[in-house]
Image (spheres, coloured by chain):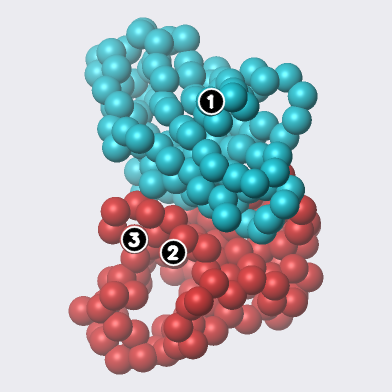
Chain colours: A cyan, B red
Amino acid sequence: AQSVAQPEDQVNVAEGNPLTVKCTYSVSGNPYLFWYVQYPNRGLQFLLKYITGDNLVKGSYGFEAEFNKSQTSFHLKKPSALVSDSALYFCAVTTGGGSYIPTFGRGTSLIVHP
Amino acid sequence: DTAVSQTPKYLVTQMGNDKSIKCEQNLGHDTMYWYKQDSKKFLKIMFSYNNKELIINETVPNRFSPKSPDKAHLNLHINSLELGDSAVYFCASSQEVRRGETQYFGPGTRLLVL
């Protein structure tokens, strides 16, 4: 079985400060990891994914995420937050040994204060 | 151009009614999905179709019946609507059935059952 946990329901950060949104996963086999963002009253938009290769993945809007196999984590980061980054962020995982349908975390609401 | 579109955007109806939600993608993808997002923003897969064939049915009540007339369309018909069906329903598509595929989401249909 595959699962993903986003331990924080909400993350608050001041504009211009670095941000981190946490994600840990549990799979049997190699993980395929995704981050999606959902703005209010919109569908989810793809940000970035890790399949294989370099542990640091760069994505849209200046976001990046680091795959850490030993800690089974895939935290989302951005060096300098913008107010417009305020949204709901979903981590998702699938695995080569299981279903190809990704399992989504419960989402983390990111609030960037001016 | 909208990549994945859904109609209607909002749907307010009475318990016991039957309603349909339509989804179309113009990305040329082979695989389409229906997700349900509840009031706590939890995202759950309902169905997946590949080239008009049903490949995933995740313990959804048989009041929900998906139909795929062609690989660009995946509609969702719901019979005998219940209060608990109130949610946001997202359609999504991906290039093919393969682990690690990025999913592209529609804007969602907000269903309220009174």
Q: Please give left or right for residue A59 compared with residue B41 in the image.
A: right
For the C terminus of chain B, give its image quadrant: bottom left
**Numbered badge on residue B38:** 3
What amino acid does circle 3 point to?
Answer: Asp
Looking at the rendered image, the disc whose residue lies closer to the viewer, 3 or 1, is: 1
- Residue A17 position, x and y percent, is 36, 8
Relative to B80, residue B95 above or below: above
**Numbered badge on residue B36:** 2
Letter of the chain that mark 1 sits on in the rendering? A
Letter of the chain that mark 3 sits on in the rendering? B
Q: Secondary structure at mark 1?
A: loop
Q: Do the residues at pointers 1 and 2 share their chain?
A: no
Q: Report if residue B50 is visible in the image.
A: yes
What amino acid does circle 1 point to?
Answer: Gln
- 10 Å crowding of disc 2: few (<14), some (14-19), many (20+): many
Q: Check whether the beta carbons of the residues at disc 3 and disc 2 lie within 8 A of each other.
A: yes
| Residue located at (28% from left, 13% from top) | A14
Name the one closer to the observer, B74 or A53: A53
- 10 Å crowding of disc 3: few (<14), some (14-19), many (20+): some
- Residue A51 position, x and y percent, is 72, 35
Relative to B74, residue B36 above or below: above
Name the one closer to the observer, B30 or A7: A7
Looking at the rendered image, the disc whose residue lies closer to the viewer, 1 or 2, is: 1
Q: Please give left or right for residue B91 compared with residue B96 in the image.
A: left
**Numbered badge on residue B78:** none
Name the one closer to the observer, B13 or B84: B84
Q: Please give left or right for residue A21 compared with residue B52 in the image.
A: left
Q: Alpha carbon of mark 1 to alpha carbon of mark 2: how far?
A: 30 Å
